[in-house]
Every structure is written in structure tokens, then in C-alpha cells.
Image (cartoon, rainbow, N blue to C red):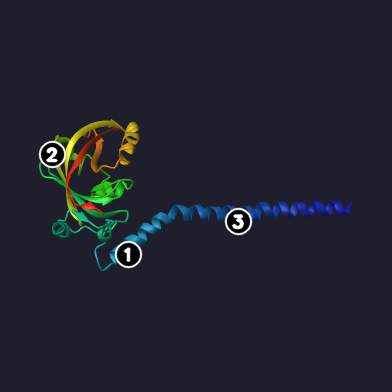
């Protein structure tokens, strides 16, 4: 009987400790953790702002992409063929070429890769395609409100120039198509495997801004006219 009362007393003590000691402690810890998680972004922002106030230089808010492009080098390379050993293969996010078409006012840098950051900076190249001169398909994309807005004025027979460090390439527009985004991947995928140098540029369609979700793509297919072959 005495043992039973003792056990019962211990249970009561534990219950009291849980109610008046452990539970408030648990709630306090949880509260501190929640406050920490909520305030961390604010504290980080304040710390960054404080750092800018005492910085010696004005901060650069733009993440600069790498570049290996040298237009003067392209002017020097006028050979019919160039060794692959003399070509620098660009890393992802690197500016390596320039695309232009004087007739429509196209004048934009070309980056290796096509993520959002790249397309904000210029024209992006799908890395599953090839650089000019490799006798394969080159697939370039750009926003229809910025660099590729002028593509709406392009016509058959117009000349598009792609300038690289190892040569200048010219392509003649031979076809223009509007393709639904759901079928574009399969159709262009088949073209990428062809042993034929072709420049494909595309952007969203239509070009008007006040349109809902743009499900079509405006494709321009151009055949190679000139430029050194990579061997």
C-alpha cells in the first residue's frame, strides 16, 4: 500500500514538473527558433545594407557573365579552315560570339547557354547544338521584347552574321515558321542531329506584349553561306 502511494506521488511530481517546468521551456525554445527563422532574412538585409554604407566602392548589383569574345581576333582569321586546337570552347554562361543583321537592326551578344540570366544579357545558345563551323546545327534563342524583337521584320533572303574569335559566318534566311511549343522540341530535336550547318534562331510568338500565355515559337531557319570550317 505504501509502495503504491509512493509511486503515485512520483507520478504527480513528474506531472507537475512537466506542466510548470518542461512545457514552458519547450514553448520558449520553439518561440526563439521561430523568431530566429523569421528575423534572419531581415537581419541579413540590414547587415548587407550596413556593409554597403561603409563600403569603399559602389556595389555592383549585376552578376557579370564571363567573356572570351574578341571582335578583332575574328577580323584577323580569314582562313577557309581552322583547327579545333585553336578554338576555345566556352564554359556555360560565357559570351563567345556576336549575332547581327543590319537590315533589321539585329545586334546582340551570344552566350553559351540559355538560362534566364543569360537571356536577360543577350542571346543564348542551346548547349545541345554546335558552335559555328562544325557543320552542325546552331540553335539560338532570345526574348521577343528585347534582342530578338526585330526578328518579326526579317524576310527570306536576309543575311544573318555570326562573328566568333576564329571566323565570321554568314547565313541566309530560307524559311520562317511558327511552331507550337509542344511540338517544337521534337521537330528541332530531329534537325539537331543532321550533318548540315544551319542557323536556327527562335523567340516567343506573337510579338505583341498584351497577350496571355505565349505557346507558339517563331523560328527562322538559315543556311550557311560562308565561314571557316572547323577541322
Report if residue 64 is visible in the image.
no
Query: Mark 2 highlights which residue?
Result: 158
Task: Give the mark toward the camera: 2 or 1.
Answer: 2
**In this rendering, the label closer to the viewer, 1 or 3:** 1
Q: Nearer the viewer, residue 198 or 50?
A: 198
Mark 1 nearby-residue class (10 Å; few <14, some 14–19, many ≥20): few
Splitting the image into 4 quarters, where does residue 94 fall? bottom left
Mark 3 crowdedness (10 Å alpha carbons): few <14, some 14-19, many ≥20: few
* In this view, 68 is above or below 110: below
Residue 119 pos. (x, y %) = 27, 47
- Mark 1 touching mark 3, by CB under 8 A? no
The residue at 69%/55% (across/down) is 17
Q: Residue 110 carries which label?
A: none
Which element is circle 1 on? helix
Quarter of the image with the C terminus is bottom left
Residue in the image at 47% along x and 53% along y: 37
| Residue mark closest to the camera, 3 vs 2 | 2
- Residue 51 is labelled as 1
Please say whether residue 85 is visible from this viewpoint.
yes
- Figure label count: 3
Please identify the residue farthest to the left as the structure is shown. Answer: 103
Most foreground residue, 122 or 189: 189
Q: Going from the N terminus, do you reach mark 3 or mark 2 first?
A: 3
Question: Between marks 2 and 1, how big is the CA–CA gap?
Answer: 52 Å
Q: Where is residue 160 in the image (x, y as percent from the top left)?
A: 16, 43
Q: Name the residue under label 3.
A: 25
Residue 42, compared with residue 105, is above or below; it is below
Q: Is mark 3 on a helix, strand or loop?
A: helix
- As measured in the structure, the alpha-carbon distance from the residue carrying label 3 to the one carrying label 2 is 75 Å
Which mark sits nearer the N-terminus, 1 or 3? 3
Is 41 displayed left or right of 118 in the figure?
right
Amino acid at each position: 500500500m505504501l509502495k503504491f502511494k509512493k509511486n503515485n506521488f512520483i507520478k504527480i511530481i513528474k506531472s507537475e514538473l512537466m506542466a510548470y517546468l518542461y512545457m514552458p521551456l519547450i514553448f520558449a525554445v520553439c518561440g526563439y527558433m521561430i523568431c530566429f527563422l523569421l528575423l534572419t532574412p531581415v537581419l541579413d538585409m540590414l547587415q548587407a545594407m550596413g556593409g554597403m554604407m561603409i563600403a569603399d566602392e559602389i556595389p555592383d548589383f549585376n552578376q557579370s557573365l564571363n567573356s572570351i569574345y574578341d571582335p578583332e581576333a575574328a577580323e584577323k582569321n580569314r582562313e577557309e579552315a581552322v583547327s579545333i586546337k585553336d578554338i576555345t570552347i566556352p564554359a556555360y554562361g560565357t559570351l563567345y560570339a556576336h549575332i547581327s543583321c543590319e537590315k533589321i537592326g539585329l545586334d546582340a551578344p551570344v552566350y553559351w547557354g540559355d538560362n534566364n540570366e543569360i537571356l536577360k544579357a543577350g542571346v543564348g545558345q542551346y548547349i545541345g547544338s554546335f558552335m559555328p563551323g562544325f557543320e552542325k546545327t546552331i540553335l539560338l534563342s532570345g526574348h521577343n521584347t528585347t534582342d530578338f524583337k526585330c526578328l518579326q521584320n526579317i524576310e527570306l533572303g536576309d543575311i544573318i552574321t555570326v562573328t566568333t574569335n576564329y571566323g565570321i559566318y554568314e547565313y541566309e534566311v530560307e524559311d520562317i515558321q511558327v511552331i507550337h511549343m509542344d511540338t517544337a522540341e521534337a521537330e528541332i530535336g530531329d534537325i539537331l542531329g543532321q550533318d548540315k550547318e544551319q542557323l536556327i534562331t527562335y523567340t516567343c510568338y506573337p510579338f505583341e506584349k498584351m497577350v496571355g500565355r505565349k505557346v507558339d515559337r517563331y523560328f527562322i531557319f538559315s543556311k550557311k553561306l560562308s565561314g571557316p570550317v572547323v577541322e
